[in-house]
Structure formats: C-alpha cells, structure tokens
Amino acid sequence: MFRRRLSLVLILLAAIIALQGAAAVLALREVERQVVRGRIANDIHLGFLQLSTTKQRLRSWLTQHMVGAGGDPAERDVLLGNLHTILADLHRLTQAAARVGPDAEGSEEHRARPEALRILDQHVRDISHSVRDMAALPADASARQAWDRLADAFEVSQGQDLRQLIALNISRETAVVQRERSAADQALARMRWLWIGMAVLLAMVALGATVYFGRALRRPLDALFKGAQALRQGRLDHRIALGGPDEFSDVARSMNAMADELEQHRQRESEQRHQLEAQVRERTRDLHEANASLHQTDVRRRQLLADISHELRTPTTALRGEAEITLRGPDRPVAEYREALQRIVDTSGQLSAVIDDLLAMARSDMDTLSLVRKPVDLSLPLMDALTQASALARLTQVHIACAPPPASTWWVLGDEQRLCQLVLLLLNNAVCYSQPQGAVQVELRACEEGRALELHIVDEGIGIAPQDLPFVFERHFRGADARRHRAAGSGLGLPIAKALAQAHGGTLRLSSPAHPGQTQGTRAVLRLPLLPSRGELS
C-alpha cells in the first residue's frame, strides 16, 4: 500500500516534469516562431527603406547627369544593381514570411506585399531603361521640363504614385514590426509565467508529497525503532502496534513473530535450564545417597567380615577342641566316640555354611557369572530345589507344601543350575526365618496371558519390618528381627537371588506380610519370561 502511494506520487512528479518539458518545448517553438517573424518583418521594413534610399540616390545621380553636372555611369550601374538586389531580398523575405505564416492581424499585409513587389519590380525595370536611355538636357531646356521627366521616370508606374506606394509599405511594415515585437514580448511573458507556474506547481506537489510522506513515515518508523530497541534490550514481550495492509505493518508483524519465537526459545531454554538444574540436584542427591549407601555397605561388609572371622574361628576352635578331648586320655566307649564324631560333623556343617557364604560373597558380582542359556522346563530346577530344601525343613520342623505342577510344560531360557540355585535361595530364606512347625507354600502360575510365569513362595515366619523392606536386596543388609532370629546369616542370599533373576530377564519382589490383614509372613514372587516353544532362543 505505501509502496503504491509512493509510486503514484513519483509518477505524478514525473508527469508534471514531462508536462513542463513539453510546455517548454512548445513555448520555445512559439517564441522562436515569433522571433523569426519579427526578424523577417524587420528585414522587410529595412528592405523597403533601403529601396527608397537607393531610389533617391539614383534620382540624384540622374538629376546631376541631366543638368550636365557630372554622374559616373559606374555609380549608376551600382545603384541599379542594388535596386535589383533589394527587390530580390524582398521577394525572398516575403516568401519566408508566407512560410512562417501570418498572425491574426497580418493577413492583409501578406496579401499586399506580392502586389507591391510586382509593381516595384516593373518600376525598377522601367527605371533601368529610362536611366540608361535618358541623355543630358540641352542648355536652353527649362528646369520644369527636367523635373517633369524625372517625375515621370521615378514617381509614377502603372498609373500609381510610387512615393505613396513605398511610403505605404514602409508604414505598413513598421506597424508589422511593432506588432511582431509586441507578440514576441507577449510570447516571452507567457513562457515566463508558464515556467513560473510549472515551477510553483512542481514545488507545491513536491512539498505536499514531502509533508504527506513525512507524516506517514514518522509514526511507523518510530514504532519500528522502538520495537528494535526493545528487542536489543531483551524485552521480548514488547509488540509493535501497527496494523493494516502496508509494508510497515508487514515488517511489524515479522518483528512481532520473531520476538514471539525468541520469547518461546527463551522460555524453552529457561525450562530446560530448570530441568537441568533439577536433574543436577537429583543426581547430586542420588550421588549423596549412593555415597551414604556405599558407606553403610562398607560398614556392613566390615561387620560381616568380622562376624565371619569370628564364625570361622569359633567352629574351627570347636573342631580342634573336640578332637583333642576325644584323643586325650585312655580309650573310651564307642558311643562316646560316635557322639564326638557327631558333634564334629555338626560343627563341620556350620563351618561349611560359613565357607559357602564367603565364596558367595567373593563371587557376588553377578556380571561375572557365566550362564549356559538353553530352553529349560522350570519344573525340573523347582523339584531339585524342593528336594534340597526339604532336608533343612525337616531339621527345623518346617513343612513345605507345593501345589500340583501344571499339566503343560513351561519353558524358559536360562541356566538350569543357576535357576535351581535361585529357587533354593528363596526356599532356604523362607525356611530359615519360619517358626518351628510353620509352613511354606510354593505355587507356580502363568501371567500376562501366557507370556510369563510367576513362582510364589509364601512363609509364615517373622516377616520383614516396613522400614527394612526397601533394603533387603542390598548386600550384607540384615534387619534387627532377622539378626535376633538367626544370628548366623550373612545378608547375601536375597541380593544374589535378585541378581540371578535379572540375569535371566526376570524380576524378584518381596512383600510382607504375606497376606492382606495379617501381621507376619513374607511373600517372594519370582517372574520369568516364557518361551512360546522349546526351540525358540533369544
């Protein structure tokens, strides 16, 4: 819109300038025409004056010749030649005046000139013959006779008085010269006023365009300048209030869109910075918690090593003492030796358990465990683990009850020996923390529409305190209730079981109490992915 208005104003200025140029050309042509007409009229006037003067000089020469007072024939010929030349010039100037064209008042003069020149031509020819043929007057001739002859030769031609004819033409040409000069002056005045008017019109149009565009540009330019300053100062919420279809409004909308996009970028950057700061704080908190957990784990590890050292030293001392007492002194009855050997076997079992804990702790990094993966029917390692756990259950008077196995075979991808170890750890943990005459329930069921199976091991033991439940899978952790119930534990069974479950792509979780509404017992749930067919491998 603004570009269109500017283009229209520029076109108007160009049209005015072109019009001024065209008017100047026309004015110059008119002035030139007036000047040419004035010059021709002046030359014709001078020609008639020269013709009259030359004729008078020729008459004077002829008078001197007639009275015998001299008169050079060469002078006569020169004067006659001048007369013919002047008449030829007058004919040429008359034709030029006819080509230029008369003005509104000069038509009569243009029609009279050719007739007057025709008479003068004939008169000059007659004078030429008369002058050459006229001899000097006799001595007794009267002056009146000489004057009449001169008058007949110079003053009358074709029945007209040449003096009046020449005087009339001179008077007429004088008036023409005055009129042409006046017309030229008027043309110059008109051209001057035309130039002044066109200059004033052009100046007014230029001034009006300047004022209009100055007012039209001031507000949008000020708004755009303030908007640019606001963007430079970082005030991205500033918007340029320009509306309309012109180019400045387009620029304002573009700047507003740019500011809006920059503001959105700033908001996203601020949000990302806050998120990053929150993540840094969270990671820092996690690191502090991990550091604290590592510190606690290290403390528990030292305590465990001290406990295991004590546990190793105690059974070893007991074995040595039992053997020395048995071997010391005279022979004893077989029953006493049998009782001593039985005590040595029991103590060796305790020592073997402590050694197993040490080996498990030494190999507790599950990343180093080597698994021989192949399709395994989970019921097989489950039965093996139940068989081994039943011996321990009989010693502690705990009953293990297993639901009947499913009719179909459930295949998992894993290491059969490690799976047996995993189930045995869970059963051993359930038996050890059960009360005498307690029961352990074992159930295998499908879940997730046959894509996974769950092994539930539920005991009626001491349970896990709520504050201890989040830490049971940490190495060497043992709650206060667990230490009171069974002081010989190492705190490695559940961490190893969870690592084995994760190594097989499964999960292990504990909940206590085992059943809603009760206050004791623990439920261990092992979930493993199932294979659709025996031959499928991951």
Image (tube, rainbow, N blue to C red):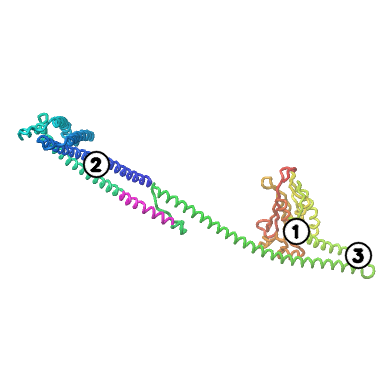
Does residue 477 belong to the magenta stretch? Answer: no
Task: Residue lying at the far front in this picture: please name it.
Answer: 139
Left or right placement of residue 523 versus residue 162 in this view: right
Q: Amino acid at mark 2?
A: Val
Of tags 3 and 2, the one toward the viewer is 2
Q: Secondary structure at mark 1?
A: loop
Left or right placement of residue 135 versus residue 457 in this view: left
Q: Residues within 10 Å of mark 1 (few under 14, many from 20)?
A: some
Q: CA distance from mark 3 to mark 2?
A: 161 Å
Q: Which residue is mark 1?
A: 364
Q: Is residue 430 above or below residue 314?
A: above
Left or right placement of residue 47 versus residue 220 in this view: left
Viewer-proximal residue, 349 or 370? 370
Q: Is residue 512 above or below residue 94?
A: below
Give the residues in magenta. Answer: 206-228
The mark tally for this picture is: 3
Task: Residue lying at the far top in this picture: please name it.
Answer: 158
Residue 435 appears in view: yes
